[in-house]
Image: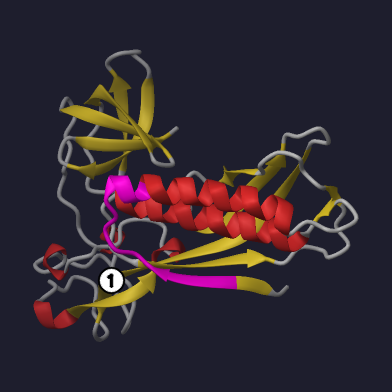
Amino acid sequence: MNAKTTISRHWPIPQTLRRRFLSFLAAGCLISAGAQSYADGFTSPTQLIGVTQGFLEFTVEDYLATGHIEGRYEIQVNNLDPRLRLAQCDKELTATLESPAQPMGRVTVRVRCEGSSPWTIFVPAQVKLFREVVTVTHPLKRGMVIDYDDVVLRERDISLINQGYMTAVELAVGQKLLRPMVTDQVLTLTHLEQAAVVRKGDQVVINARSGTLTVRMPGEALSDGGLSEQVRVKNLNSKRVIKARITGPGQVEVAL
């Protein structure tokens, strides 16, 4: 299937500039609703793709700025069936991220008309997020202790990496390998012998995330764990026991 592609590069964005960008995007969606619709009263696939593209660009920029993440991204919105016939909307189209919680990898955007003839359509897209991550410079054997000559930073699409990638070689140097690796392979925390970052009985902060929204709660670790490992944690407010991923000393994360 053909796709429409936009390539952008992220730089840190001040909060005021992001608010202006959001206002600009909303205005652009409103203008396009009248300018790009079919003469016979239908909403064009081109307009739907444009709304999805604009929404994802803002969402990714906001995700990067909120997380203080340096990188570049590519967005590919799948073309829609040109025979699609959705009524022309007499209100501004709205867009929300249907899945997943973070705007990376294969995503689905819900575009909705809430006018006199309401409708909803789900538009698939692909978001690639490129960052400089630690990779291996030559084949390494299991049990080796990593030195500076063994690793280097290279740009990779982190949407293809599950978890545990590193953005500084210092995090890998001096660590012992648990398994053999090949040249150019991305080195993740799962390849390294991990010391416990959180221990049973430690007081931790539970960070519950949904997109760019974060809620923090006090918790208590019920088991030991290393960086990026999942441990059982008791929420000290609700007394519920949950599974959360360790993101640092005294810090765990769970998706809402």
* Residue 12 forms part of the magenta stretch: yes
The kind of residue tagged 1 is: Glu
Magenta span of residues: 5-18
Say which of 11 and 20 sits in front. Answer: 20
Residue 104 visible to the viewer: no
Q: Dividing the image into 4 quarters, which one contains the N terminus?
A: bottom right
| The stretch drawn in magenta includes residue 52 | no
Image location of residue 256, percent across then percent down: 45, 32
Relative placement, left or right, of 93 versus 214 is right
Q: Quadrant of residue 38?
A: bottom right
| Front-most of residues 230 and 38 | 38
Q: Which residue is mark 1?
A: 132
- Return the x and y of residue 107 as percentages of the image width and height: 58, 54
Determine crowd level at label 1: few under 14, some 14-19, many 20+ residues with C-alpha closer than 10 A: some
Task: Describe residue 218's horizontal placement relative to residue 10 as left or right.
Answer: left
Residue at the (70%, 41%) spot, across then down: 112
Work out whether 73 lies above or below 63: below
Q: Does dot 1 land on a helix, a strand or a loop?
A: strand
Please determine whether, in this image, residue 170 is positioned above or below residue 58. below
Q: Residue at x 15, y 40 (%)?
A: 249
**Mark count:** 1
- Color encoding of the figure: secondary structure
Residue 18 in view, yes or no? yes
User: Residue 25: x and y, percent?
Assistant: 51, 51
Q: Residue at x 26, y 41 (%)?
A: 246
Q: Quadrant of residue 83?
A: bottom right
Query: Along the horizontal axis of the image, is 36 left or right of 12?
Result: right
Residue at 20% from the left image edge and 58% from the top image edge: 193
Could you say where residue 62 lies in the image, as x and y percent from the top left? Answer: 39, 50
Between 234 and 8, the residue placed more toward the observer is: 8
